[in-house]
Amino acid sequence: MGSAPWVDSMTVGVPELDDGHKEFFRHMSAIIAALHDQSFAEAERICRSMFAMAAHHSEAEEALLRRLDYPCLQNVIDVQVELAERLKRLLTLIIRRSPEAHGFAAGTLEALVAYLLRGDINFKSFIQEMRDAGRLTEPPSARKAG
């Protein structure tokens, strides 16, 4: 069927972001399973949910990195845009009931791993430096907007 397990080395050290990444894996695995079973309606529902979740996650991740003055923010944004484009394409294939949808979903899961390794894992040490410097002491969702 095609799946990639979450491994702890993909953790970036911010629970809110790590939980979102794990949820991406759960969604992609569920999409692949639904497509394997030819359940396009279920795959579409999950893909739409994942697309919305990914948009929220990207906003939160970008806001955190902007607040911390992450010097390679554009690299993360570029990878997020690339993943969003893949999700749009996947949704289109699912809606069209394309036989290519299953293979593209498996490729999207691989792209998700690459996203974590190319985009997010690069700021893992930066996040730890910010925590050590006292600039990251609580989850981003616990901070008051200001």
Image (cartoon, rainbow, N blue to C red):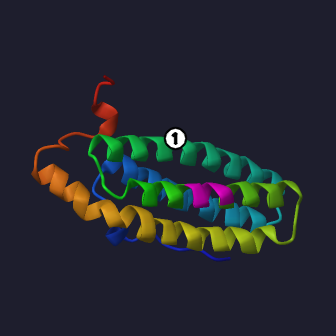
Image quadrant where residue 49 sits? top right
> Is any atom of residue 108 visible in this view?
yes
* Amino acid type, callout 1: His
Left or right position of 17 against 85: left
> Is any atom of residue 11 visible in this view?
no
Left or right position of 37 against 18: right
Region in magenta: 81-85
Image quadrant where residue 75 sits? bottom left
Q: Nearer the viewer, residue 89 or 13?
A: 89
Up-down relation of residue 56 to residue 115 (above or below): above
The N terminus lies in which quarter of the figure? bottom right
**Label 1 residue SS:** helix
* Residue 53 spot, x, y in % from top left: 56, 44
The residue shown at (72%, 54%) is 88
The residue shown at (31%, 38%) is 140
Q: Is residue 82 magenta?
A: yes
Residue furthest left in the image: 133
Left or right position of 103 against 122: right
- Residue under label 1: 56
Q: Nearer the viewer, residue 106 or 58?
A: 58
* Residue 96 spot, x, y in % from top left: 89, 57
The residue shown at (75%, 59%) is 89
Q: Total marks drawn?
A: 1
The residue shown at (31%, 22%) is 146
Up-down relation of residue 15 to residue 118 (above or below): above
Q: Main secondary structure of the magenta part?
A: helix
* Residue 135 spot, x, y in % from top left: 16, 43
